[in-house]
Amino acid sequence: MNLFTRIREFYKNLNLFFKFQTALFLVSTTTLSVIGYFGYNEGRRLLELRSFDLLVNITSNKKKAIEEYFSQMQKQLEILAERSSTSGAIKDFSEIFDKPFENISPKAETELKKFYDEEYLKLLKYNAEINNFQTDFMPKSPLRVHLQHKYLAQNPNPLKFKYNYAGPKENTDKYDALHQTFHPNFFNYAQKFGIEDVLLVNMKGDVLYSVAKRADFATNLLEGTYKESSVAQLFRKVIAGSEEKKVYFQDYENYYPAYFEPLAFMGGVVIRNDQKYGVIIFQISTEKITNILTNNQKWSEDGLGTSGEAFLVGSDFKLRNRTRRSLEDPAGYYEALKTKVDKVTWERIRRLGTTIGFREYKVKATINAIDGKSGKETNVDFLGSEVLDVYMPLDFLGTRWGILTEMDGAEVFAATTDFRSQLLTISIGLFIAVTLLGTWLARSLAAPMRKIQKDITMLSEGQFPKKSEKIYKDELGKIDEALNILVQSMRNVAEFAQNIGRKNYDYQFKARSDKDILSNALLEMRDSLRTISSEEDIRSWRNTGLALFGDVLRENNSSLEILSKAIIAELVKYIDAKQGALFVFDDKTQTLKASSAYAYQKYRYLQQNFREGEGLVGQVYFEKASIYLTEIPADYSNIASGLGHIKPKCLFLSPMVADNKIYGVVEIASLNEIPLYQRNFIEEIAENIAITIANIKSGEDTKKLLIESQKAGEQLRQQEEEMRQNFEELMATQEDMRTRQQQIDDLIEHLQQMINDELEIDGQNSTTILRKQMLEDIQKQKNILLEKELDSMKKEKYIREKVEELGKNIDE
């Protein structure tokens, strides 16, 4: 019995419990191994790109949400400012402030001073890390002391919760009555729209009313203790502003009435019947902004994992929201921050529990964002860790912030670096999980009630329990049936979300009702992502095409014929058309000739020429502009296949222009309409084809000139050789003539001497006369030789001039 047989027999003898666990483990491990092998190789390549894409989407969504929040706050402020109840409240409260008030008891002053010393200043000094203040925060005016005593000192609610106080029920006065009339409306309005505080200020700067009931209540913003505060600055901007701009914003500053907490405000003028009554001021909810950026501290649901976060930075490069680490692990964050900031700043961050307005984050990304730029890059955070940053500017109400989304590089790349080492651990964990799951399934079958309890527990933890196949008719059966419906609904939502994550935006999904908030939100998200994905696909398709045709043009530029065949075939295939032709202008015949075609009836089109302005091709050449037709002429070529013929649905012709010179026309026919982005792409490729054709023609002209130059040079060299040979022959002739002339000169000299000797002896005898005649004949021969020598010298000069001329021609 071999080993395989023994293993098979052993497996057959196992009970079903162990068989189930073993099979589940083997299937899970095998699947994980295969997925891991291919996922590791492909995932590492795409991980960084997709991480940046994810961060860009998150940043855009967060930016939009913040802009919508400020837009809503602006709208609500304008609505409240236009209400008659608001102007009426300012008018009624102002009448009380305008009247003299002297009835203030020493007890009220004492109790208010105690409130400032034991509550307000104690917390303010602690938060601000300041032991002594030069300013006396307690108001001096009897009316202001009276109102603060009633609504601050006698307010039974603790600090930061004094907005719950509607006013005293005994010993009330006119202000108390007005407060009880207006406070519920303003308080409910603030609660409904998430506004931290609402201030009503008259044109004199008196803070007539406050929802939060802080130390700025009943003070004066132009003359009082807080005349330099951020609220006072905002008040002055509003009353000095133009009528066109109704709402102003004051960025985060440490606000003393809020116990040194950094706050931001929004304010607008209250006008009724063209009369300015005062200013209404909203305190912006820092919690709302933080919740938008942190997704209510559910970062992982935004796809930010365990380290990613989005945050805001002001023009001073200081944070405008609490960071993720300060929310998740305050103690650890404060400890890490201890060496990064000065001691006073560190204490203020720790005591106030916020980084807003304290921690500076000035890096290249934040600088670019404040400069109005958007982008993505890798930076180093304040802890020295590598992070991926995506940044964008955020503009509202004359203020610019920068919004950044950041993720730790170690987390982004951890999956690829740890995948192989974790595979074994995952397999072991899977084995344990399968074992536990099998045990749990076995036990759950024995107790239906326990099963329902555990199913609900699993749902609360985000897991989907197994659907009950058998439903009883009792109460437990009804619960089980309802649970099945709930589980199926959640599965549908999860499957829809997964398909969105895979960019399957055509996946069919419907909300159960108009009140199905989650499903409707997912459908809205799907529509937004579909639009973004479509634009990205078009951009990717274009870039891939440009790279592809760049390679085709480089690899097939040896001749016009090779280029034409390669480019028209590749172009028709890439845009999924059916026919295509390339017409190139022939300078000799002054016509457009079909250089190449794809899937055309060749006997009809390849030999066809067009003159400028003739037909669609000639018209495109004449106008240097593209033509797109969806109504095809009756005599146009059909698209043929093995099964028959069909007329194309649309036709697109584009000129091939480079440096304002047209080189030809590209013609494309398709059974489907050619969208605008593909037509733009064809025009881009046509320009590149024109540049390549220009280069090919230039190369061919250069080759022709080179060949002609070589032929001319060869002819000149042959002529030079003939001249050289003639010159050598001439030189030999001249040398021979000089020799013969020398001989004649010697003979003449000898004869002359003999004649002279004979004349002295015998006189002129017959011999002497004969010799004289011989001398004269010889002299004539000499003259003939001299004439020939002169002709030879002329020929030599002519030959030399010709040789010099040939040399110049060869050099040229």
Image (spheres, grey):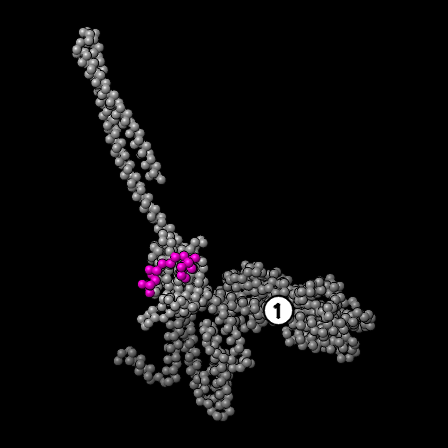
x and y, in percent, of residue 344 in the image: 64, 62
The residue at 70%/73% (across/down) is 83
What amino acid is labelled 1 in the image? Phe
351 left or right of 55 in image:
right
The residue at 50%/90% (across/down) is 478
- State the quadrant of the C terminus: top left
Q: Is residue 488 above or below residue 142?
A: below
Residue 513: in magenta span: no
Q: Which residue is mark 1?
A: 70
Dividing the picture into quarters, in which one does residue 181 lie? bottom right
Foreground residue among 349 and 641:
641
Q: Is there any visible trace of residue 654 in the rendered image?
A: yes
The residue at 34%/62% (across/down) is 605
Residue stretch in magenta: 601-622
x and y, in percent, of residue 190 in the image: 66, 74
The residue at 31%/34% (across/down) is 803
- State the quadrant of the N terminus: bottom left
Q: Tell me the SS state at disc 1.
A: helix
Foreground residue among 244 and 349:
244
